[in-house]
Amino acid sequence: MAISQVKHGERRSRSGRDRGQLRSASLVLLLLLLVGGCEPLEPQPPVETRASPTPSPSPSPSPERKPDPPHEWYVHDVFFVDRDSGWALAGSGSGRRVTRIYGTDDGGQTWAVLSEPKIPLANGNNDPKNGVRGVVFMNRRVGWIFRPSSYVTHDGGRTWRRARLEGRVLDMERGPSSAWALTASCYRCSLTIHRAQGRGVAWRPVRQPKLGKGEGMLVSGLASNQEGRG
C-alpha cells in the first residue's frame, strides 16, 4: 500500500513538474515569437493632400448685339445743272434722321452714293438749327445743301463744310454764273438776299429793299432778273 501510494505520488509530482516546465517553455517561446516578430515601424512620409481645384465659373455669354436695321431712304430734293449731272438729297426714315447725297452723270439712269455727311435732316416742323432739306449746285463741283442751315461742297458732293451764310437759309437758287440765297436772321425778321460767285465761298448781300415775311418775292425770280441785268 505505501509503495503504491508513493509511486502514485511521484507520478503526480512528475506530471505536475512536466506541466510546469511545459508552461514555462510555452511562455518563453511565446515571448521569443513576440520579440522576433515585432520589428520597429519606419516612419512613413506624410501623405500630401491636395485640394481639388474649384472649377471657375464659365463666363456668361455677352448678349449678341443686333445689327441696326437697314435704313429706308427718302428723296427730299433733286437738282440738275445740265441734262446729265444731278444730285439728290435723301433722308433716313429711321429715328436717326441722317442725310445722304446721291449723284448721277447719266441723266438719272443710275445713281451712286457720294457721301453721308453727319448733318441732320430737317423735317419742316421742328427743324434743328444745323439741319438741311434742300440741295442746289452752281456747277459740277460747287453746290450747297440748305434750309435752315447751309453747307458747301467743292468736290461734287463728296465732302461738306459750313457755308459762310448768316441766319436761317429759307431758299437757294442758281443762275448761269452765280448762286442766290434768301435768309432771315430770325423768324419774324426781314428777309435778305445774298449772292455768291466763282467758288461760292463768299456771300454778299444784294442791295435791295428789305422784304417783309410773306411778301411773296422768290429767290429764283430775283436771280433771273439779276442775271439778266448783268
Image: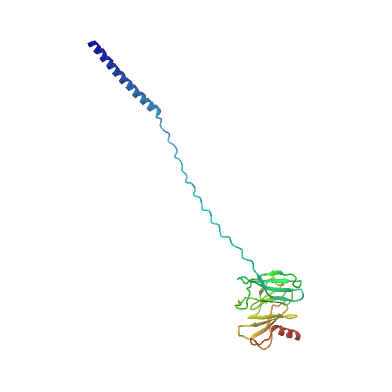
* Residue 12 coordinates in the image, percent (x, y): 27, 16
**Residue 22 can be seen, yes or no:** yes
Location of residue 8 by image quarter: top left
Residue 81 vertical placement versus 51 (above, below): below
Residue that sits furthest to the bottom in the current view: 209
Judge by depth and name the residue closer to the eye, 2 or 17.
Answer: 2
Task: Identify the colour scheme used.
Answer: rainbow
Looking at the image, residue 144 sits to the left or right of residue 95; the answer is right
Q: Residue at x 31, y 18 (%)?
A: 18
Residue at screen point 31% across, 20% down = 19
Whole-percent x and y of residue 30? Answer: 36, 25
Within the image, what quadrant is residue 183 found in? bottom right
Measuring from the top left, give residue 21's x and y in whole percent. 32, 20
Q: Quadrant of the N terminus?
A: top left
Q: What residue do we see at 76% from left, 85% from top?
A: 228
The outermost residue toward the front is 1
Q: Is residue 209 above or below residue 111?
A: below
Rendered image quadrant of residue 70: bottom right
Q: Quadrant of the C terminus?
A: bottom right
Residue in the foreground of this view, choosing between 145 and 123: 123
Does any portion of residue 230 appear in the rendered image?
Answer: no
Q: In this view, does 212 lie above or below 55?
A: below
Total labels: the figure holds: 0
Residue 142 image offset from top left, x and y in percent: 72, 75
